Amino acid sequence: MTGSTIRVSRVYDHEPHPGRSVLVDRVWPRGVRRDDLGLDEWAKDVAPSPELRRWFGHDPERWEEFRRRYFAELDARPQAWRPLLDAARSGTLTLLYGARDRDHNNAVALRDYLAARLAED
């Protein structure tokens, strides 16, 4: 959809978060003060279940299966991600995460999930 952008940013990078910024991890990132993050929302409910997070363990070899399982969890909880989709429709949405791996984390998967929903519009 024109005008919407979904960005992904690591909380430890200390870069500006344009638009609406939302932490999408279930666990608060270590060593980060809430006041320093400057986020608009902490959306714990959109994060993968604790069981899925533990199973994945940020193992790149489990990435595709993680995405499949995470997307199934998201399909079952539209009330968790619909507000993010609405925010993306109205401008820039920045999904914040704490994981070390920049390519294999729930924020990247969530961005892809939301982008697919936007494309359906």
Image (spheres, rainbow, N blue to C red):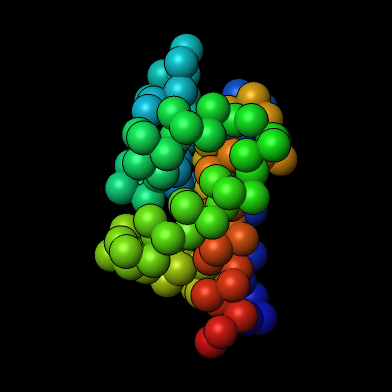
Quick one: 86 or 61, which is closer to the camera? 61
Q: Which residue is drawn at 66% across and 81% down?
A: 2
Instruction: Tell me which residue sits at (35%, 41%) in the image.
Output: 49
**In the figure, 118 relative to 75: above or below?**
below
- Counting from the top left corner in percent of width and height, residue 20 is at 48, 54
Total numbered labels placed on residues in the image: 0
Q: Residue at (42%, 71%) from the top-left corner?
A: 86
Please report the residue visible at 63 percent of the width from the left and 65 percent of the height from the top.
Answer: 5
Please indicate, yes or no, whether residue 56 appears anywhere in the rendered image.
Answer: yes
Residue 40, how many percent across, how many down? 39, 46
**41 sits to left or right of 38:** left
Location of the N terminus by quadrant is bottom right
Q: Where is 2 relative to 103, above or below?
A: below
- Tell whether 57 sits left or right of 101: left
Above/below status of 63 relative to 73: above
Pick the residue in front: 116 or 29: 116
Residue furthest top as drawn = 31
Q: Quadrant of residue 78?
A: bottom left
Question: In x, y percent, where is residue 24?
Answer: 44, 43
From the top left corner, tell me how far across and down residue 62 is, in percent: 62, 39
Residue 15 visible in the current orientation: no
